[in-house]
Image (tube, rainbow, N blue to C red):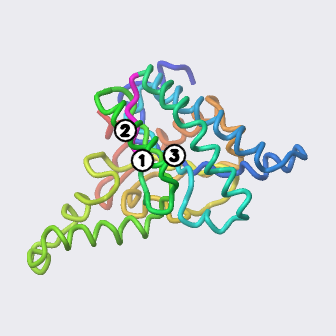
């Protein structure tokens, strides 16, 4: 499938990816897990570039979950260092391409240096109108919902007894103001959601591939989009072709 066949209205507006398999990729090559994470960063860069080139509106990448803190301390330390060291360089590249960066997740528990860089990245790219890149760091779907409900309660108090609805919850989600994902991709062969965007992906199309994240290149992304285009989306109602919904 050529570029012309995956552009414009035929694209999902919002693609979300669970980037899984860095450790297994490294193990297959008899490399340390850290090498897998470094390769994963490079692959993320390529996929961000490709989504921008194709005209995707929003790309959400699951970078580090609230559950990832359970990994060995040395691996967590490396991941946090990798994020902090690469953030400025990657944001600068995205900024030059006109991308807007936004971070999802809890900032409590992250180092002050990393949080400062995250805030600076959001401010620097706030005026860009290209691809919107959501980076989910210290993110968990359940934690996001708890936080959204807490904020709604603080802001609206008594109104919640009579005026509590979906639109109020959505107002306080990390993704507020953005359309929900159309396509969720998970690499490495696992077929589960792993606490990712639990509210937002209620009607997303799910695509699971055995390809490990460091090997998920532009060709693999094209395959995922092609599969999305073959799906029939109903949203609980009548049948609708995926590509027609993105006009």
- Locate residue 110 relative to residue 220 in the image: left or right: left
Furthest toward the right, the residue is 30
Q: Position of residue 242 (x, y in %)?
A: 39, 42
Numbered circle sitting on residue 61: 3
Q: Does 72 appear above or below 31? A: below
Q: Residue at x 67, y 55 (%)?
A: 77
Q: Residue at x 47, y 38 (%)?
A: 229
**Placement of the C terminus among the 4 image quadrants:** top left
Q: Position of residue 243 (x, y in %)?
A: 38, 36
Counting other residues with Cα less than 10 Å from the Cα at mark 2, is it few (<14), some (14-19), or many (20 or more)?
A: some
First in sequence: mark 3 vs mark 1:
3
Tell me the residue that label 2 is attached to.
Answer: 122
Q: Quadrant of residue 190?
A: bottom right
Q: Position of residue 138 (x, y in %)?
A: 50, 58
Determine the CA span between mark 2 and mark 3.
Answer: 16 Å
Counting other residues with Cα less than 10 Å from the Cα at mark 1, is it few (<14), some (14-19), or many (20 or more)?
A: many
Tell me the residue that label 1 is attached to.
Answer: 103
User: Which element is circle 2 on?
Assistant: helix
């Amino acid at each position: 499938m050529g570029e012309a066949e995956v552009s414009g209205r035929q694209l999902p507006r919002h693609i979300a990816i669970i980037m899984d398999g860095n450790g297994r990729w490294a193990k297959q090559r008899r490399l340390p897990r850290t090498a897998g994470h470094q390769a994963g960063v490079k692959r993320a860069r390529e996929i961000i570039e490709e989504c921008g080139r194709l005209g995707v509106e929003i790309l959400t990448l699951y970078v580090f979950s609230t559950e990832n803190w359970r990994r060995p301390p040395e691996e967590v330390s490396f991941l946090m260092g990798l994020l902090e060291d690469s953030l400025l360089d990657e944001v600068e590249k995205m900024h030059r391409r006109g991308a807007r960066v936004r971070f999802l997740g809890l900032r409590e528990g992250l180092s002050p240096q990393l949080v400062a860089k995250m805030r600076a990245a959001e401010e620097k790219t706030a005026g860009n109108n290209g691809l919107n890149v959501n980076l989910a760091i210290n993110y968990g779907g359940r934690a996001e919902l708890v936080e959204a409900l807490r904020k709604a309660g603080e802001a609206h108090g008594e109104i919640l007894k009579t005026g509590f609805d979906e639109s109020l919850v959505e107002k306080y989600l990390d993704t507020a103001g953005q359309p929900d994902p159309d396509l969720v991709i998970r690499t490495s062969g696992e077929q589960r959601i792993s606490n990712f965007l639990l509210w937002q992906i209620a009607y997303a199309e799910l695509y699971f591939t055995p390809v490990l994240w460091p090997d998920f290149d532009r060709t693999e992304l094209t395959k995922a989009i092609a599969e999305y285009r073959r799906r029939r989306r109903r949203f609980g109602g009548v049948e609708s072709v995926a590509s027609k919904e993105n006009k």
